Amino acid sequence: MQWAAALAAFGMGLAPWTVRNYRVLDAFIPVTSYGGIMFSSSNATLGHPTVQAGGYYHAPGIRGYLQSLPESAWGPEGLRMGIEQIGEHPALFLEAVFHRAVNFWTPRPDPYDPSWTRNDWVMSFIWIPTLLFSFLSFVRAPGHLDWPSLVLVGYTFLVTLPFWGTPRFRFPIDSLVLLRALVSVEAGVGAARARWKRPRGAAVAP
């Protein structure tokens, strides 16, 4: 039932784009047609410093060329250009993907700002423990795994890696990460209470 609800919600989320593209472009494109341009901006210029830092760069020549094409061709052509560069520069691509992953999970609201701000400190104080306890939940409460939620978290993370990394892409799943952290805290508190209530000298069950 959980999987059916998750798939239904996923389909409902994509439906507006799919219907719009079919009506306007007369083509089955389940996501935004602008995705091809963003894919090329993230991968067609892998040597650019901003791209290497996990961001994107709108190269005027590439973006102008893509926007001169019919909208239905933005996706396939942008994908082709990006994949071509990935094949030619795999090491640069892997470096960019690493920084995209870091920027996805970072506590900093703007990971591309070279200065460390007060907001960065505040968010670090909140987000780092949340992320830590969320990971610990797999050890402390392995029997309380909500697989649809975990798949959604993993899907959201992996889908961003071909593009660019920013905490804004993580915001839709932050609540799920927080729930995992609360599961970990609850399991830890329960274990501490059980240990505290156990009589001194009582044998610990193997």
Image: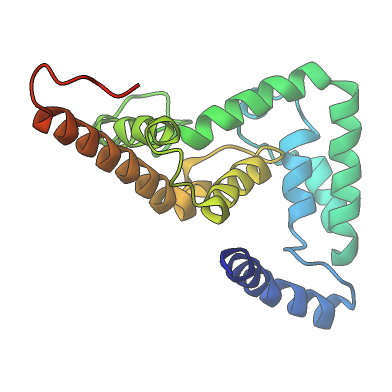
Q: Residue at x 30, y 24 (%)?
A: 205
Q: Nearer the viewer, residue 113 or 130?
A: 130
Q: Residue at x 11, y 16 (%)?
A: 201
Q: Quadrant of residue 95?
A: top right
Q: Residue furthest bottom?
A: 23
Instruction: Give the left or right position of residue 157, taking residue 71 as reference.
Output: left
Looking at the picture, how far across and down is residue 156, in whole percent? 60, 48
- Quarter of the C terminus within the rendering: top left
Looking at the picture, how far across and down is residue 171, in whole percent? 45, 51
Location of residue 124 with respect to 3 vertically, above or below: above
Q: Nearer the viewer, residue 70 or 191?
A: 191
Looking at the picture, how far across and down is residue 170, in whole percent? 49, 46
Q: Nearer the viewer, residue 141 or 60?
A: 141
Q: Quadrant of residue 20?
A: bottom right
Location of residue 189 with respect to 195 vertically, above or below: below
Q: Residue at x 57, y 37 (%)?
A: 165
Residue 53 in sight from this viewpoint: no
Q: Nearer the viewer, residue 47 or 157?
A: 157
Give the number of marks: 0
Looking at the picture, how far across and down is residue 162, in whole percent? 72, 39
- Quarter of the N terminus within the rendering: bottom right
Residue 95 in sight from this viewpoint: yes
Instruction: Give the left or right position of residue 169, taking residue 62 as reference.
Output: left
Q: How is the image coloured?
A: rainbow
